[in-house]
Image (cartoon, grey):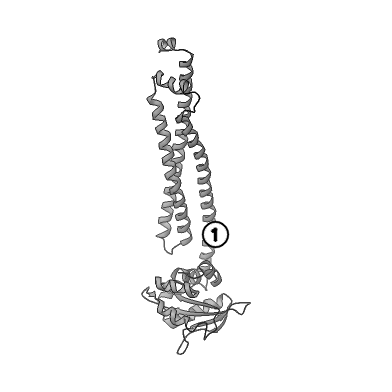
Amino acid sequence: MSSMVARADLDDMTAAFLWVMEGQLTLDICKHLQSHRDWVQREFDHAAKRSDEAWSAIPLPTDFGEIAGDTWGSLQKELDQAERAYKSATDALHMMREDYGDIARIRERYIHDAESVPPPLESLIGLWHAYLDADHRVRQVIAKDRDRTHSAALLEVERQIFCEGPECISMYHIDRMHHTEFERTVAELVRRDGYTLERARGGAGDLGADVIAVAPGTATRFIFQCKHTRTDATVGSPALQRLNGTARQVHRADVVVIVTNGSFSSPAQAFARSQNISLIGRSGLIDWASWGVPLQEILERHPLLSS
């Protein structure tokens, strides 16, 4: 080593110094990018676990599942970018290490090409700036997740309190109702939310209008058709077409709503969108009957589909 130093001229010493400095910078950036990648991986795994736990829980805490799923999706993109950035940095580090002891190659890079920015250093500076931006984005994702989860937790407490009260109607009981009891239940939910009832149940000659009500403080007229199922059946478009033929023309409806404890077929959903018919399916009914979410909020969340 001493003989090599003795033979080295000023250019050799300068090139070696620059190589060491660039190598140290490369190593530091690699460590930061590795730490960032590992951090994103931990947050990604945590979001995925929360999402799996939420969607498998009973009763289903939909809010928590959606929040964790959104966070998981955002972090997946960040994790992919973090993996690529770390690989690029380690590739640059390997390139630096390959030059170890080869003063001719080091001199060529730093002395003969001194007017140009060395490619490894240029790419590393880009990676560093990208890392700073990524770090900021990930912190925003985690902060948003924290805030949304906090709000959902407060809402969950409100729901649990409502569930312990007399106005909560569980889906267990709804699924076991007779269809006439289901109509009366929908009418009671409408009344609970402050609507004035004009009809509380259907019957012969109702022309599809099982429940008729007027919104509080307005003259807005709501027509409800109730479709109960004990087999989680799907409501098809013929039922919507029959109601559409009478709801506005005969019953003077401003808002037409079909409620079911089942689901709606794709053609039924398409027809509802084309005719401005609001659909409240199983998940919307859970919010309305079991969690106490007001009807207006249910319809505002999903103007044409609350299933």
Inspect the image, locate mark 1, and give the three-letter code of the amino acid beneath it. Answer: Leu
Tell whether 248 sits left or right of 80.
right
Pick the front one: 191 or 272: 272
Tell whether 3 sits left or right of 297.
left
Q: Label 1: few (<14), some or many (≥20) within 10 Å?
A: few
- Pinpoint residue 43: horizontal percent, then vertical percent: 45, 47
Q: Work out whether residue 121 can be spotted.
A: yes
Mark 1 — residue? Answer: 154
Q: Work out whether residue 43 can be spotted.
A: no
- Count of numbered labels shown in the rendering: 1
Q: What residue do we see at 51% from left, 49% from top?
A: 141
Pick the front one: 281 or 15: 15
Q: What residue do we see at 41% from left, 59% from top?
A: 55
- Pinpoint residue 264: horizontal percent, then vertical percent: 41, 72
Residue farthest to the bottom, as pictured: 205
Residue farthest to the left, as pictured: 231
- Pinpoint residue 93: horizontal percent, then vertical percent: 41, 30
Q: Quadrant of the C terminus?
A: bottom left
Depicted 26 relative to depicted 293: above or below: above
Q: What residue do we see at 46% from left, 50% from top?
A: 74
Pick the front one: 38 or 61: 38
Depicted 215 relative to depicted 30: above or below: below
Q: Quadrant of the N terminus?
A: top left
Pick the front one: 159 or 68: 68
Quarter of the image where one finds residue 179: bottom left
- Pinpoint residue 42: horizontal percent, then vertical percent: 43, 45
**What SS does tag 1 mark?**
helix
